[in-house]
Amino acid sequence: PQPFNWQDPLGSQSLLTEEEIAISETAEAYCQERMLPRVLQAYRDEHYDKKILEEMGELGLLGSTIKGYDCAGVSNVASGLITKAVERVDSGYRSGMSVQSSLVMGGIDEFGTQEQKDKFLPKMAKGKLLGAFGLTEPNHGSDPGSMETTAKPHPTKKGYLSLSGAKTWITNSPIADVLLVWAKYHETGKIRGFLVERSECPPGTLETPAIKNKNGLRASLTGMIQLDECPVPEANMFPDVEGLRGPFTCLNSARFGIAWGTIGALEDCISRTRTYALERKQFKGNPIAKYQLVQKKLADATTDAAFGTLAAIQVGRLKDKGEAAPEMISMIKRQNCDRALFNARVLQEVFGGNAVSDEYGIGRHVANLFVTQTYEGQSDIHSLILGRAITGLQAFV
Ligand code: TGC
Ligand code: FAD
């Protein structure tokens, strides 16, 4: 038998192709060598270095599953491995990448016109053009179907629509060049997607103030999108998709990514805790790693990380074949976020008073993982999505 490897307890590596292993190694090396040294200060300063997206673009890590348009066209499992490498460093860095890759580039690739794809995707793949995804509103988070943002004919500009409304808690909005805004279209009252280009918006029609003083995800930028009769060319609307199917299709990919990423964050917590517990001595010079209660915490967390990885690989393989039901993605998003948060909180205890120091990294992951459990569908909402699929009964309303 294989010797037990605490870093890959169930041998998930044996399920990967050579190409996937090579991509994972490239992503892990970049993240550990170039991202990790920056994260502590960035988190303290609530700063997001947008050069990170350019660096990721140079390595072909953005929009990685998209075929053509200077994107790598790799498998969903490979993209999951990239996401895991990034979130091993910080959920905020993964957030910036998820929005760019899954939510905006993914949306354009799936629903955009040929002109929209040609115009935006190659520059976004290189991280030269940054995206944001505006679905959540101040009064409508879990229930985006009730959104109030509207797209009406522009009163003075022919061939333009006028977008009005407010989006909140939007990752990357303060720095985004292209904002994918979901709004209700005047002719049908149905939700449609609009590509709002910051450089084309007259002064006062688009504001994207930052939301400051967050106690999680501080290495990621979050803000609002305020639209006041903002003129957007009709050509910037997604041509065919209407209703919530548009944003939720983008969310299927982003939620899949979070299911991978949170396991990366959890693995980092396990590794940091193991190192600390082997070094820290209490009671007659014993390392605290020798005590049964500490070992149980590591055993629980390592088991959840291993199970979470296998589930994510399985859904990734089905996604490549076009066979992944959205409920499968809800299941792994909910489970991996919940177990990562639960275990990270428990492992934090092993650090004693040092858990309070940001130098140890574990508190940052705990604060971040609370956010991952909340955005892209809070865990209880995913319970209701699963409950509906299991019973056939709708519990939301
Ligand atoms: P419901 O009746 O369930 O569905 C309405 C229409 O949408 C279709 N649909 C889907 N299509 C594709 N994929 C999915 N996963 C889909 N889920 C639903 C559905 O077929 C239907 O289509 P049609 O053609 O019949 O109209 O809609 P509902 O209003 O009852 O939905 C309820 C609920 C709770 C499931 C939904 O609203 C929900 O998931 N709420 C959570 C909201 C959410 O996830 N927001 C995310 C905002 S973006 C974000 O957080 C980014 S963070 C990024 C980062 O920084 O990493
Ligand atoms: P609410 O919908 O008010 O929910 C509050 C609580 O009530 C939750 O626990 C929820 O589960 C529960 N609840 C609600 N309805 C029900 C029900 N029917 N039954 C049982 N429980 C219920 N959004 C974007 O569009 N784009 C982004 O880029 C983006 N980035 C984000 C970045 C950060 C840092 C954060 C914090 C959020 C981001 N969001 C983004 C928004 C995020 O998706 C929402 O916060 C999330 O969907 C929850 O909505 P809400 O905050 O309005 O909570």
Image: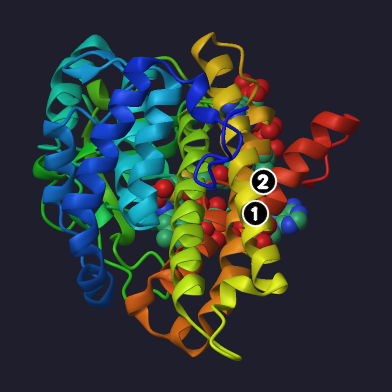
Quadrant showing the N terminus: top right
As helix, strand or loop, the secondary structure at mark 2 comes to helix
Q: Position of residue 24 (x, y in %)?
A: 33, 31
Question: Residue 279 is drawn in which quadrant?
Answer: bottom left
Which residue is at a point 45% across and 30% down the rendered structure image? 250
Q: Is residue 106 left or right of residue 242?
A: left
* Amino acid type, label 2: Gln
In the displayed image of the protein, which residue is found farthest to the front? 284
Ligand 2 lies under 8 Å from the Cβ of mark 1: no
Q: Position of residue 325 (x, y in %)?
A: 65, 21
Which residue is at a point 40% across and 33% down the rendered structure image? 81
Q: Is residue 60 left or right of residue 200?
A: right
Q: Which mark is residue 335?
A: 2
* Amino acid type, label 1: Arg
Cα distance between the residues tagged 1 and 2: 6 Å
Indicate whether 230 appears above or below 246: below
Q: Position of residue 66 (x, y in %)?
A: 31, 18
Q: Quadrant of ligand 1?
A: top right
Viewer-side residue, 129 vs 21: 21
| Res. 143 in view | no
Q: Position of residue 285 (x, y in %)?
A: 53, 87
The residue that disc 1 covers is: 339
Indicate whether 26 appears above or below 170: above
Which residue is at a point 62% across and 72% down the rendered structure image? 290
Alpha-carbon neighbours of circle 2 within 10 Å: few (<14), some, or many (≥20)?
A: many
Viewer-side residue, 72 vs 139: 72
As helix, strand or loop, the secondary structure at mark 1 comes to helix
Q: Is residue 279 left or right of residue 67?
A: right
Question: Residue 178 is drawn in which quadrant?
Answer: top left
Viewer-side residue, 288 vs 224: 288
